[in-house]
């Protein structure tokens, strides 16, 4: 491969990354919508919002379904961040709802 | 909805989360393979491994293609973690290759 061909090959791979990333963003937002629906169901039935055992299930699911090359620890760290961000979305939504409530 | 129906609805949503997560794990690993291929091309052509401008492109791509409800900052933080984990994979691979080289 010439240097020029190398740069072209790099461009091809980068476009791949960009398209994979767009798919990941879509799935992250779909996941957020489901998390919001779960929050709605929990509030309706006064179920506990934070359930550490369910989080263990989430981590088990992603590490058991990890074919690599990412390590189990790597996958877990990415999902820790994902779960954390979805918690932020729920917290912001709750704060917004509280702000809308009329004062007594 | 009765409490029982609420629990059933929760189960349905959680299975959705689990299946979305498996898709995300697949995409993360596909992304890792492409990142490794990029590393191979860069080494072959002695191109710089770390390119901050390319990282800006990655962040721009994901935030421009974010339809929400995740915020741009949330998406960016998730991808900071993803990029970091892929860097770990590349570093581990390089260390493993160096360890295999015969001593002079």
Image (spheres, coloured by chain):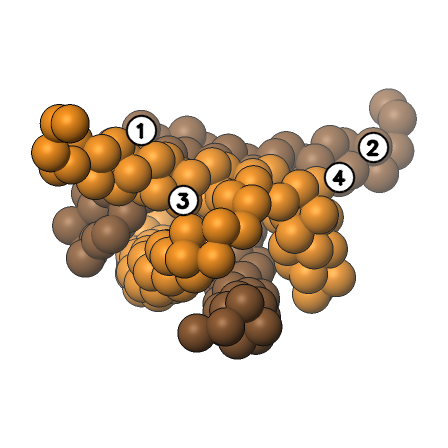
Chain colours: A brown, B orange
Q: Position of residue A82 (x, y in %)?
A: 48, 42
Q: Are marks 4 and 1 in contact (CB under 8 Å)?
A: no
Q: Are marks 4 and 2 in contact (CB under 8 Å)?
A: yes
Residue that numbered label 3 is attached to: B86
- Give the chain of mark 2: A
Badge nearest the viewer, 4 or 1: 1
Residue that numbered label 1 is attached to: A52
Marker disc for residue A97: 4
Residue that numbered label 2 is attached to: A99
Q: Secondary structure at mark 4?
A: helix
- Quadrant in the picture for the C terminus of chain B: top left
Q: Residue at 41%, 57% (x, y): give it.
A: B44
- Give the chain of mark 1: A
Q: Position of residue B58 (x, y in %)?
A: 64, 54
Image quarter for residue B77? top right
Query: In the orientation shown, which residue stands out farthest toward the front?
Result: B104
Q: Residue at 40%, 44% (x, y): give it.
A: B86
Q: How many other residues sit within 10 Å of disc 4, few (<14), some (14-19) or many (≥20)?
A: few
Q: How many other residues sit within 10 Å of disc 2, few (<14), some (14-19) or many (≥20)?
A: few
């Amino acid at each position: 491969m010439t240097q020029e061909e190398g740069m072209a090959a790099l461009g091809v791979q980068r476009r791949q990354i960009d398209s994979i990333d767009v798919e990941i963003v879509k799935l992250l937002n779909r996941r957020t919508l489901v998390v919001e629906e779960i929050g709605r169901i929990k509030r309706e039935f006064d179920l506990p919002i934070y359930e550490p055992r369910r989080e263990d299930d989430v981590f088990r699911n992603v590490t058991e379904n990890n074919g690599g090359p990412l390590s189990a620890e790597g996958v877990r760290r990415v999902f820790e961040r994902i779960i954390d961000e979805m918690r932020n979305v729920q917290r912001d939504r709750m704060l917004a709802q509280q702000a809308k409530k009329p004062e007594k």
